[in-house]
Image (spheres, rainbow, N blue to C red):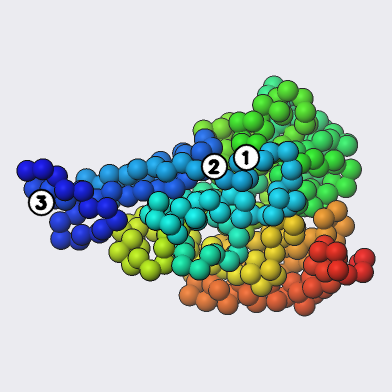
């Protein structure tokens, strides 16, 4: 019998039974970087394992953030530069799913799209990476870097927290994929890099991690270490299709962290860190808002049931604003007096 291709149709009664001749094709949009492809292939492999017979097609797209490497991310318009083209492919039905690093996604999604699944979270911490074979410079404190060291970091959040701990450091913007950044480090363009531990681990570069930065020094970006699977919100069959790889606790953490972002209306031009963790059946949500030079930091913490994730995140954001975060944000955005 000739096999019939059913595009974008989930057929629970016949899916995965070869005798019916039903073939389900799933198209997953992704960026073309090595890390993005590894993440997408990881998702595809787990979907195939959960649904025998599934055919997955990868739709590789080049985003604006991948194409322009000579400008800082905030100057290019923020987080949306890494997801817009993938979301357009979902909306015009060139793809059925998109796999993102959640930290790259803006707080608000386009109408008609939703995050339908979040698999198990990888290590959310930032990592200090030193040049190959370079001995760490002795220095008192948490960062083994020489005075005045040049540290490549791609976010204001990382730069601000580094400066808060070590005002003598010289954070410098670094663009390109992880392999490119590591080559620049080893070539001597930087004395150290700060990168997401999750990305290094997924790329098989965990051995390059010299130090996992403690949370009291460097709190991660909202969503760091989480893969977000985005799809059209009006397709409940796709959501059921993703259920075997979905982790509801990770989703609660993601919801809380993104609620902090939404409450502050913060993008890449705001040094904001947030992390939610499950401790003793309660979600613990902490956040840190800083001035770009790290000279001032505002902290907030809330805890409560995972089912109240969005409300917890909003309360954390409101606490930040109430402690002077509103004035700090006005200063960062250029419409307030210096603090």
The secondary element bearing badge 1 is classed as helix
273 over 180 or under it: above or below? below
Give the side of residue 23 with respect to residue 34, left or right.
Answer: left
The secondary element bearing badge 2 is classed as loop
Q: Earlier in the sequence, mark 1 or mark 3?
A: 3
Q: CA distance from mark 2 to mark 1?
A: 7 Å
Residue annotated with mark 3: 20
Q: Nearer the viewer, residue 207 or 323?
A: 323
Residue 237: x and y in percent read 30, 64
Q: Residue at x 50, y 56 (%)?
A: 87
Q: CA distance from mark 1 to mark 3?
A: 44 Å
Q: Residue at x 19, y 54 (%)?
A: 15
108 over 322 or under it: above or below? above
Give the side of residue 88 with respect to residue 319, left or right.
Answer: left
Q: CA distance from mark 3 to mark 2?
A: 37 Å
Q: Earlier in the sequence, mark 3 or mark 2?
A: 3
């Amino acid at each position: 019998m000739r096999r019939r291709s059913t595009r974008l149709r989930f057929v629970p009664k016949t899916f995965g039974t070869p005798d019916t001749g039903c073939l389900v094709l799933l198209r997953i949009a992704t960026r073309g970087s090595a890390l993005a492809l590894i993440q997408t292939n990881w998702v595809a492999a787990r979907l195939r394992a959960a649904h025998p017979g599934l055919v997955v097609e990868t739709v590789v797209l080049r985003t604006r953030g991948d194409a322009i490497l000579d400008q800082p991310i905030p100057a290019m318009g923020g987080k949306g530069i890494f997801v817009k083209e993938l979301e357009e492919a979902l909306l015009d039905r060139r793809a059925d799913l998109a796999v993102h690093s959640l930290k790259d996604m803006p707080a608000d999604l386009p109408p008609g799209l939703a995050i339908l699944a979040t698999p198990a979270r990888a290590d959310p911490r930032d990592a200090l990476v030193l040049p190959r074979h370079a001995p760490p410079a002795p220095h008192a404190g948490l960062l083994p870097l020489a005075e005045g060291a040049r540290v490549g970091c791609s976010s204001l959040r990382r730069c601000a927290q580094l400066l808060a701990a070590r005002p003598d450091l010289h954070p410098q913007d670094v663009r390109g994929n992880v392999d490119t950044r590591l080559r620049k480090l080893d070539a001597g363009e930087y004395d150290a890099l700060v990168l997401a531990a999750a990305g290094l681990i997924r790329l098989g570069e965990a051995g390059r991690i010299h130090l996992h930065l403690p949370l009291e020094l460097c709190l991660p970006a909202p969503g760091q270490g989480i893969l977000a699977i985005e799809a059209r919100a009006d397709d409940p069959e796709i959501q059921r299709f993703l259920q075997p790889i979905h982790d509801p606790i990770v989703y609660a953490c993601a919801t809380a962290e993104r609620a902090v972002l939404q409450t502050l209306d913060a993008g890449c031009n705001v040094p904001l860190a947030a992390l939610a963790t499950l401790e003793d059946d309660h979600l613990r949500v902490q956040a840190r808002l800083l001035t770009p030079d790290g000279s001032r930091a505002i902290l907030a913490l809330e805890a409560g049931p995972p089912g109240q994730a969005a409300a917890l995140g909003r309360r954390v954001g409101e606490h930040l604003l109430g402690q002077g975060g509103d004035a700090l944000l006005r200063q960062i955005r250029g419409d307030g007096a210096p603090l």
